[in-house]
């Protein structure tokens, strides 16, 4: 997952790599929890800082048929800079089931 974040410290692009564990509720509804790592490079002039940390997610896939569905997800990243900084986000979109 990737999103653009702008704040007092500049602009970053956190990139999360998560392992998701689905919870079997039904054929069409698949809630999941996930955990992994996040890397957030700084963007803009003179931005050379790379922040890393832990990522977590809670969401659900709704399969519509034909291997296509929708997802909604809430995520929280803990970024390690000079201090531990939490970053919260919401995401949604199209998902492909294999």
Image (cartoon, rainbow, N blue to C red):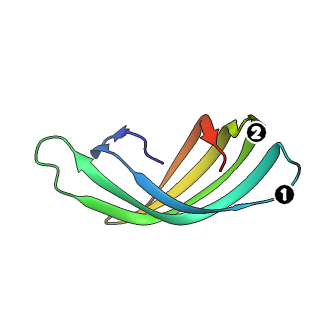
Q: Nearer the viewer, residue 68 or 32?
A: 68
Name the residue: 69% across, 40% down.
67
Q: Nearer the viewer, residue 19 or 44?
A: 19
Name the residue: 85% across, 47% down.
27
- Packing grade of label 2 (10 A; few <14, some 14-19, many >=20) is many
Can you give x and y, in whole percent of width and height, for residue 24 in the image? 84, 57
Can you give x and y, in whole percent of width and height, for residue 10 in the image? 26, 43
Q: Which mark sits nearer the N-terminus, 1 or 2?
A: 1
Q: Nearer the viewer, residue 14 or 64?
A: 64
95 lies left or right of 18? right
38 lies left or right of 97? left
Question: Is residue 83 something one can see in this rendering?
Answer: yes
91 lies left or right of 26? left
- Packing grade of label 1 (10 A; few <14, some 14-19, many >=20) is few
Label placed on residue 63? 2
Q: Label 1: state its secondary structure.
A: loop
Question: Toward which corner of the image does residue 7 lie, by quadrant?
Answer: top left
Q: Up-down: is 3 above or below 53?
A: above
Name the residue: 32% across, 61% down.
51
Can you give x and y, in whole percent of width and height, for residue 22 in the image? 74, 59
Label placed on residue 24? 1
Can you give x and y, in whole percent of width and height, for residue 33 in the image? 69, 59
Q: Up-down: is 92 above or below 76?
A: above
Question: Is residue 84 something one can see in this rendering?
Answer: no
Q: Label 2: state its secondary structure.
A: strand
């Amino acid at each position: 997952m990737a999103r653009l974040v702008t704040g007092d410290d500049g602009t970053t692009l956190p990139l999360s790599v998560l392992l998701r564990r689905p919870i079997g509720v039904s054929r069409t509804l698949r809630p999941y929890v996930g955990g992994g790592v996040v890397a957030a490079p700084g963007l803009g002039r003179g931005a050379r800082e790379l922040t890393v940390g832990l990522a977590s997610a809670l969401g659900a896939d709704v399969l519509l048929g034909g291997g296509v569905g929708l997802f909604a997800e809430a995520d929280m990243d803990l970024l390690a800079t000079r201090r531990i900084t939490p970053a919260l986000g919401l995401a949604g979109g199209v998902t492909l089931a294999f």
